[in-house]
Amino acid sequence: MTIKGPLSGIRVLDLSQAHAGPFGTQMLGDMGAEIIKIESPGRGDLVRVLPPKIKGEGYYILALNRNKKSITLDLATDSGKNALFDLARISDVILNNFRAGTMEKLGIDYENVKKVNPKIIYCSITGFGPTGPYKDRISMDDVAQGLAGAISLCGESDGPPMRPGIPVADISAGMFAATGIITALYDREKKDEGCKIDINLLNSTMFLMSNHFQNYFLSGKVPGPQGYRHPILPFAGSFQTKDGYIMLGAVWPYITKIIGMKSLADDPRFNTSEKRIQNRDEIEGIIEDALRKEDTAHWLKLMGKEDLAVAPVNTLDKVIKNSQVIHNKIVINMEHPLCGSVRAIGNPICMGDRIQGEHEPSPTLGQHSREILKEILSYSDEQIEELAREASAHREVLAKRYRKI
């Protein structure tokens, strides 16, 4: 039994690849939508080649493409393009994350698709937007984060800019795309027409930084790297222990009792919020010196008794063994046709019994091509063979062109 949920009955054509688009469509698939992943013959999604792999299946594909069906179509051929339009006629959503102008060149842009399905919801994710001075530029997550200012906030004050450990621009664009699509589906129920949605990595990243921009708009001060401590609140951030690091939240004045230095609470250097901020390097140094004398488990136990906001800085192997993570059942298991049992991180949205069924693992390249063409489009064997012939001929042309280069 596949996933059944609030979006069951909605068909999404996913022309995206890499991270942003597949992340968004996987969210929709987790809610019950039927996701048809359209990939180029031979190569498929460009991240299929990225290691590590299991039985030839790359980790990116396994992470971002569950609850989808894969069909290979060469959209540069007449037969491939016609098949796409045939699918568009009976679908609700199309999503792509090609560079601005690519879909227009292929003739499968919103205006053309709308002619065969006026109710289609057409979502495009680009790096910087479909218009403007940067519309023709290639973008990736790190590039968008750099332009948006996110990279300038990472790292230490005396060090170089540092990229975050997660692809902030891609993930946020994918989530906003899913949000926009669901909103458009709701709006379509009232207006009985589709619409065009534009999402870009630059805007998505800047939206996540609203608090930093608001600070700048009010103060006129450009924020720098945030380091490993909170930029405003003393004691909020990572502190070293004897065997690792812990993250502290708002712990004053309770921390003084825990480290056996209650007199710090009344110390004239630290007895007001203003003084603690003014002298934060000194007081945080005192606290960290104390914390380094015992291991993380010792401090977690003491701080837990005081009901403080605290957590260890876990590596991923420790995260999946955490009792709350296990209780939340966020790690899911699926049976892949090639890889066998695979684990993944599930969708964090819980809706009681509104979402039921078993997750389907990410598809192999073209795994459902014949099924989709035969059962959804009712194509004949001759039509399917013609698709394969045109795609193969086009690949040979491209191969000769690349050999000359």
Image (cartoon, helix red, strand yellow):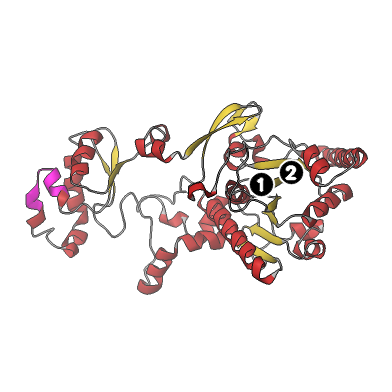
Of callouts 1 and 2, the N-terminal one:
1
Q: Answer with left or right where residue 381 lies relative to residue 182.
A: right
Residue drawn where x is 75% and y is 37% of the image: 366
Q: Quadrant of residue 120?
A: bottom right
Please give left or right for residue 145 compared with residue 300 in the image: right
Residue at x 49%, y 51% (from the top left corner): 351
Q: Where residue 39 is drawn, which disc sits there?
A: 2
**Residue 384 at least partly seen:** yes
Q: Which residue is the site of mark 1?
A: 17
Q: What is the secondary structure assignment of the residue under circle 1?
A: loop
Image coordinates for residue 191, horizontal then vertical, percent: 68, 71
The answer to whether marks 1 and 2 mark residues whose Cβ atoms lie closer than 8 Å is yes
Q: Which residues are magenta?
A: 255-264
Q: Nearer the viewer, residue 376 or 289?
A: 376
Q: Residue at x 68, y 65 (%)?
A: 196
Numbered badge on residue 240? none
Q: Nearer the viewer, residue 157 or 85?
A: 85
> Badge 1: few (under 14), some or many (20 or more) residues near its Cα, within 10 Å?
many
